[in-house]
């Protein structure tokens, strides 16, 4: 191998030093041209500078060193073309010059594309549930309102009762209403028979005031279905009218018997509170001549009629008997 002259070697080293200084100064000053590679052929230095703004453009730098005799001492190899990509080191990283800042390509790549970061979620508080109210234990419970009094249902009709009746003609003379003393205060409590019946048969119990005045009550007429809150519009009917009782046997009673019959509170059947209009329509007629306008009550009316006559040992005439028999047969 031929040995170069000492002068050529010195010039070659000087040129290489100048090129290296130029490259370092360019990088330090933020220049856009950086060294991409430095090659040495037979001791001759050549540098290829790549434009950082366009890596595909490579500028070859030739170094021709002429010796003192005027001959060419050495010629550097000219790089005709440079690949667009920077050469890589055996480890896959781009080479950098000493003192130069690392380029972006020297940063280790991440494993795969960056994953989007999910926005933080705020935990949703559970929906509030209604808390059942606890009743105040110190508050006394309010009792439910009492239901209004109801009218006691009458006994069922019994056609077999007819067998106990006596069938006789009526005694049709000598009747006088004054022979039956009525509306007496038998127990001395200040309320006569009329008011006693109104109190007992009231649908809404009335308030009893001075002189047995009755207020704030209500009544129902079983004969015609009329209701009232004014007791003065109701009469107390003798189911067996006083004259009917006289004609059926009371003509032969003592005054005490007639008074007891006229004020009979021993049975709920003898006296009944009804509308004044229905009582006066009935007058002293028997079932052969009159029946309650309220048809649904007629069986009860006929049954009650028979029971009262049996209780007081009163007779019936034939027409009366036939009417009672026909009513009760249909009950």
Image (cartoon, rainbow, N blue to C red):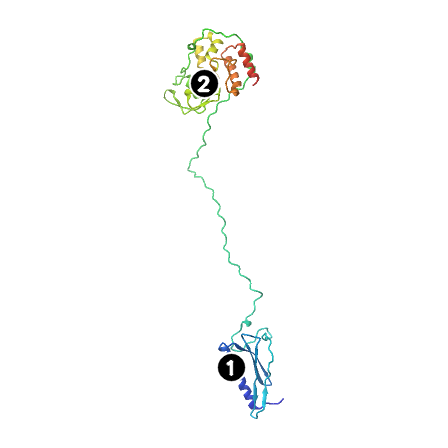
38 displayed left or right of 232: right
Nearer the observer: mark 1 or 2; the answer is: 2
Q: Which of 200 and 167 is in front in this view?
A: 167
Image quarter (top left, top right, bottom left or bottom right) of the C terminus: top right
Task: For label 2, count other residues whose C-alpha is less than 10 Å away and answer few (under 14), some (14-19) or many (20+).
Answer: some
**In x, y percent, where is residue 50?**
55, 77
- The local secondary structure at tag 1 comes to helix
Give me the disc on residue 22: 1
In the displayed orientation, state which residue is furthest to the bottom.
69
Q: Which of 64 and 198 is in front in this view?
A: 64
Q: Distance between the residues labelled 1 and 2?
A: 140 Å
Residue at 46% across, 11% down: 243
* Relative to 216, residue 257 above or below: above
- For disc 2, the marked residue is 277
**In x, y percent, where is residue 110?**
56, 67
**In x, y percent, where is residue 233?**
42, 20
Q: Which of 111 and 320 is in front in this view?
A: 320
78 displayed left or right of 253: right
Q: Is residue 280 visible?
A: yes
- Which of disc 2 and disc 1 is earlier in sequence? 1
Task: For label 1, count other residues whose C-alpha is less than 10 Å away and answer few (under 14), some (14-19) or many (20+).
Answer: few
**In x, y percent, where is residue 1?**
63, 88
* Relative to 311, residue 133 above or below: below
């Amino acid at each position: 191998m031929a040995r170069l002259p000492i002068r050529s070697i010195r010039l070659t080293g000087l040129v290489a030093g100048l090129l290296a200084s130029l490259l370092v100064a360019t990088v330090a000053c933020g220049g856009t041209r950086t060294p991409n590679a430095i090659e040495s052929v037979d001791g001759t230095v050549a540098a290829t500078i790549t434009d950082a703004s366009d890596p595909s453009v490579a500028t070859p730098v030739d170094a021709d060193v002429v010796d003192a005799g005027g001959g060419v001492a050495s010629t550097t190899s000219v790089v005709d073309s440079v690949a667009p990509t920077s050469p890589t080191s055996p480890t896959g990283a781009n080479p950098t010059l000493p003192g130069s800042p690392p380029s972006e390509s020297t940063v280790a790549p991440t494993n795969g594309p960056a994953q989007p970061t999910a926005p933080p979620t705020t935990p949703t508080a559970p929906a509030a549930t209604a808390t059942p109210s606890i009743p105040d234990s110190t508050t006394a419970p309010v009792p439910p309102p009492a239901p209004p009094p109801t009218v006691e249902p009458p006994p069922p009709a019994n056609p077999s009762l007819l067998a106990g009746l006596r069938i006789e003609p009526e005694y049709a003379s000598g009747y006088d209403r004054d022979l039956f003393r009525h509306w007496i205060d038998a127990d001395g409590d200040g309320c006569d028979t009329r008011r006693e019946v109104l109190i007992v048969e009231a649908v809404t119990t009335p308030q009893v005031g001075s002189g047995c005045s009755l207020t704030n009550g209500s009544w129902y007429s079983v004969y015609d279905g009329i209701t009232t809150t004014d007791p003065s519009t109701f009469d107390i009917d003798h189911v067996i009218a006083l004259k009917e009782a006289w004609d059926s046997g009371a003509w032969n009673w003592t005054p005490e018997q007639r008074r007891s019959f006229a004020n009979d509170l021993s049975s709920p059947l003898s006296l009944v509170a009804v509308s004044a209009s229905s009582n006066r329509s009935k007058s002293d007629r028997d079932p052969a001549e009159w029946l309650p306008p309220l048809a649904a009550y007629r069986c009860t009316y006929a049954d009650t009629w028979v029971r009262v006559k049996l209780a007081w040992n009163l007779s019936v005439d034939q027409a009366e008997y036939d009417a009672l028999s026909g009513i009760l047969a249909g009950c």
